[in-house]
């Protein structure tokens, strides 16, 4: 029996509910299967939901609804510099301490600040992220800036953020 294609507003309402109730990122492919429409239709729907100020972000693991009102964890923006071959080392160093690497940001000479969501907090998520970069033959944003980039880090305490900075400094990755 063929599943019914969900139409317009009904589909976006369902997408919003799925994202709001999920504790993990949901891929566009999963959303596409659930609603019986193409991945491109999902991308358009997500764009429309974002235009309505729904706090949806696209991470390397899928779409995530940012819950408001949840207890805010301490965050810190740090500057790093390394070549692409040290990306895994950098991310493992951070997640092993208990850090969530929320994003990467570079300053582009033409476009200004470019930010991409990473949202990794475990070695498994780091591996998934790096596998996607490899599989799609994508470049790291930091390759546009001689390896210089910023990360927004999140942790359960300021002490963990201090520990992360210290570990990156010891590894020669942190830019002070």
Image: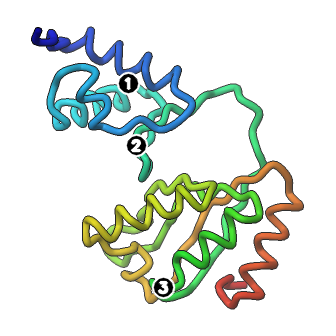
User: Would residue 73 appear left or right of 140 to someone viewing this image?
Assistant: right
Which callout, 3 or 1, points to the residue nearer the camera?
3
Residue, disc 2: 62
Determine the residue positioned at 43% across, 67% down. 130
Q: x%, y% of residue 112?
A: 40, 68
Q: In the rendered image of this protein, does residue 117 appear above or below residue 45?
A: below
For image coordinates 50% across by 31% down, the residue present is 65
User: Mark 3 or mark 2, which has the lower sequence index?
Assistant: 2
Give the Cα distance between marks 2 and 1: 20 Å
Say which element carries label 3: loop
x and y, in percent, of residue 55 in the image: 49, 32
What residue is disc 1 on?
A: 52
Residue 147 is marked as 3
83, 49: nearer the viewer? 83
Q: Residues within 10 Å of mark 3 (few under 14, many from 20)?
A: some
- Which is in the foreground here, disc 2 or disc 1? 2
């Amino acid at each position: 029996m063929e599943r019914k294609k969900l139409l317009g507003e009904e589909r976006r309402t369902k997408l919003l509910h799925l994202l709001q109730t999920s504790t993990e990122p949901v891929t566009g492919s999963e959303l596409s299967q659930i609603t019986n429409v193409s991945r491109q239709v999902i991308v358009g729907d997500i764009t429309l939901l974002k235009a309505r100020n729904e706090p949806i972000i696209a991470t390397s693991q899928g779409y995530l609804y940012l819950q408001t009102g949840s207890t805010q964890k301490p965050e810190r923006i740090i500057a790093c510099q390394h070549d692409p071959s040290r990306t895994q080392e950098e991310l493992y160093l951070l997640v092993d301490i208990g850090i969530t690497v929320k994003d990467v940001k570079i300053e582009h000479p033409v476009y200004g600040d470019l930010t991409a969501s990473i949202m990794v907090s475990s070695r498994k998520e780091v591996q998934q992220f790096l596998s996607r970069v490899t599989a799609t033959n994508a470049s790291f944003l930091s390759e546009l800036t001689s390896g210089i980039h910023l990360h927004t880090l999140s942790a359960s305490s300021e002490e963990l953020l201090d520990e992360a900075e210290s570990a990156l400094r010891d590894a020669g990755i942190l830019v002070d």
